Image (tube, coloured by chain):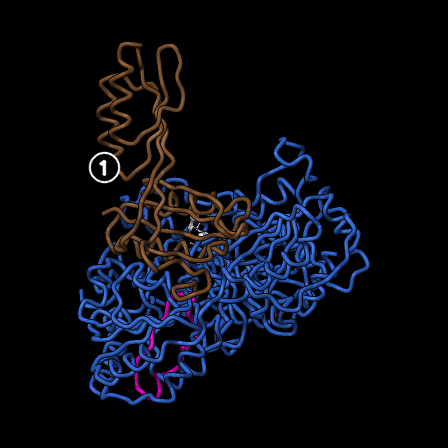
Chain colours: A blue, B brown
Amino acid sequence: MVVEALIKEKVEVIFGYPGGAVLPLYDALFDADIKHIMPRHEQGGIHAADGYARATGKPGVCIATSGPGATNLVTGIANAYMDSVPVVAITGQVPVPLIGTDAFQEADITGITLPITKHNYLVKDVKDLPGMIKEAFYVSVTGRPGPVLVDIPRDVFVQEANFEYPERIDMRSYRPTYTGHGGQINRALRVIREAKKPVICTGGGVVGSGAQEELLKIAEMAQIPVTSTLMGLGGFPGGHPLSLGMLGMHGTVCANYAVTESDLFIGIGMRFDDRVTGKLDSFAPEAKVIHIDIDPAEIGKNIAVNVPIVGDIKRILGQMLKKLKKGDTREWVSQVDEWKRLYPLGYEYSEEELKPQYVIEQICKITGGDAVIATDVGQHQMWTAQYFTFNKARSLISSGGLGTMGYGFPAAIGAQIGRPGETVFCIAGDGSIQMNSQELATAVGNQLPIKVAIINNQYLGMVRQWQELFFKRRYSSTFLEQGPDFVKLAEAYGAAGIRVTKPGEVVPALQQAMEIKDRPVFIDFQVASEENVFPMVAPASPINQIIGGGKE
Amino acid sequence: MKHVLAVIVENRPGVLTRVAGLFSRRGFNIDSIAVGETEDSELSRMTILVEGDENVIEQVIKQLNKLIDVVKISNLTNESTVNRELVLIKVKAEPAARAELQQLAETFRAKIVDVSLDSIIVEVTGDDEKIKAFELLLRHFGIQELVRTGKISMMRGVKYIKINGEGGKSG
Ligand SMILES: Cc1ncc(C[n+]2csc(CCOP(=O)(O)OP(=O)(O)O)c2C)c(N)n1
Ligand SMILES: [Mg+2]
């Protein structure tokens, strides 16, 4: 019955791992017309489902058994929740009569995931099953998307009942707003027309709602510079003259200056996270704020908003476009260009030492920027955000809100499965990749030609950087002395492995990797070990106080 | 400032946990919460007393609204309302003190609902002030146990909470 429901939902692929409580489901899957990918760890499975969802815009589906299977999903669920990714997780549960008795492999997964799911269900009666699965998908993908978990006891899987799948649903307790309020839109348009120094900031919501075209038109028509959060990269073409690059802690100088000096800040599908705003009192101190978001609870949560607009971003920007009148921003745009020219991103290139930034630049070059890039978490993630030019929506797949090490590789697997034939890179850290390297078996088994660029600095680099800057270089537990030989590791699984130690070897290695079409490849880029990510705004500081960039 | 929220929820298992969990997770302070079925058996109504300034209350309402099982939230703080709470108090009552207790109870329109050798249970309903005053008086006799239901609240006059009417959920 679950399988029938998944087919009704047009699910094409499931990432799942079997076990006792889901045996009946696996028996049904055995000859079902749905592709099933088995990861080597449930965390890998849910990250892959999450990566699939981010890459395709379709909900990602994963399965785990009761108890340890379900608890292994927890990090992945939290990750999807923080970044508003539509994932439906189906878990097995002990039979209904045993619930609450500490039965073998029992875990209260609906209780555990209450604060990290958009909603969850425990199906105690097979009659409720179709309706609950339908609701789960509906809730997951609509409004502000998010993970939904459906916990199904073993005996419910095997109960017989008439299968009637609801065609439509109408939930009186859940009705997202999609159309923007006309009055607020008019106010926003007036404020935009009057602004002399406006800035737009794109967040993950722009990508999620597929509003990139509308946004591009608005920015161009009104001549407004555009910055972005990490999650928003690709929502506006990074190579566009109006693009300022990323905002916040490791944002560009020009973006941080522009926001600080702006008289109008237009936040679109972003949530004013502390990594973006720095010290709140000093964030865009002169600016009026327009905030467009599908989630009313985000509006006014962290900063006061002058013009709130709740609804679907694509629709709202479409509504705005019809009446948009531009103000005069010529002076402002040239000021912003001046900052861009004075304070570009940069690093010291070296012939001897391999610089991580150089590696990312070359990946950007060789792919023409036309690739799906999944990242892990750390310095390499920030260098990717800085040195890869994301021109297309859904081209960056990265753990923003939760910052989950080990996310990148399984997410890349999900992305490659969702977008076969496209170039998928995983830019990984030498620390992070070890958190889910077992998924090499999954990637090899499914002949996925993922290119894993390991930025191997022999450190938990991002933590080391903070120790260097804020803890007197006391490198407590951040040296990764005992790293594996990544080339051999890859080869042990039947994947390809390449080692790169000099700048001159980067391009040939990438070319070689691009030629491999039938299996994953690990490229061990042995980079300078104490390189830092700059520019940087110290945590809880104003974003125009920048270390390693800007006016000293 | 104290606010009174009437929260209509789907009458499903776990819904109280969802609501209570939200308050603790987001650091909101609940003073009291009273729950029971409504005129529609599929719906329950929670009356929640919560402490906080306007911004906090706005967030509380918005976050509650995001819970899928929450159907409707009404802020009754600035409405003219009838408020009630029921309290049971077990007081020491030597035979000599009973007459006085009896009298007190009558003044407060409280009822003596159980009598034993050396104690009685008094039931009193009313608003906060009345209950406080009554409790203070009973302290002299020695309170052994006190239990309260939490406040419930309803708008006076023609206004009432329509489930699918204006102010319903969005977002
Ligand atoms: C699961 C998890 N544990 C710990 C952290 C804290 N943390 C953030 S970045 C980082 C270092 C990551 O090291 P590596 O993957 O080598 O990347 P680098 O910073 O060196 O590029 C750590 C430990 C985290 N984000 N996630
Ligand atoms: Mg590292």
Q: Which residue is mark 1?
A: B129
- Answer with the quarter of the image where residue B132 lies: top left
B8 is higher (above) or lower (below) than A306:
above
Q: Is residue A351 visible?
A: no
Task: Please name whichever residue, B140 or A37, is drawn nearer the observer in this view of the structure.
Answer: B140
Q: Position of residue A52 (x, y in %)?
A: 59, 64
Residue in the image at 65% along x and 74% along y: A421
A102 is higher (above) or lower (below) than B31:
above
Amino acid on which the number 1 mark rests in the picture? Glu
Quarter of the N terminus of chain A within the rendering:
bottom right
Which range of residues does the magenta coloring cover?
Answer: A219-241
Quarter of the C terminus of chain A within the rendering:
bottom left
Q: Chain of mark 1?
A: B
Q: Is residue B160 visible?
A: yes
Q: In screen coordinates, is A40 left or right of A178? A: right
Q: Position of residue A527 (x, y in %)?
A: 45, 58
A454 is higher (above) or lower (below) than A270:
above
Residue in the image at 24% along x and 73% along y: A258
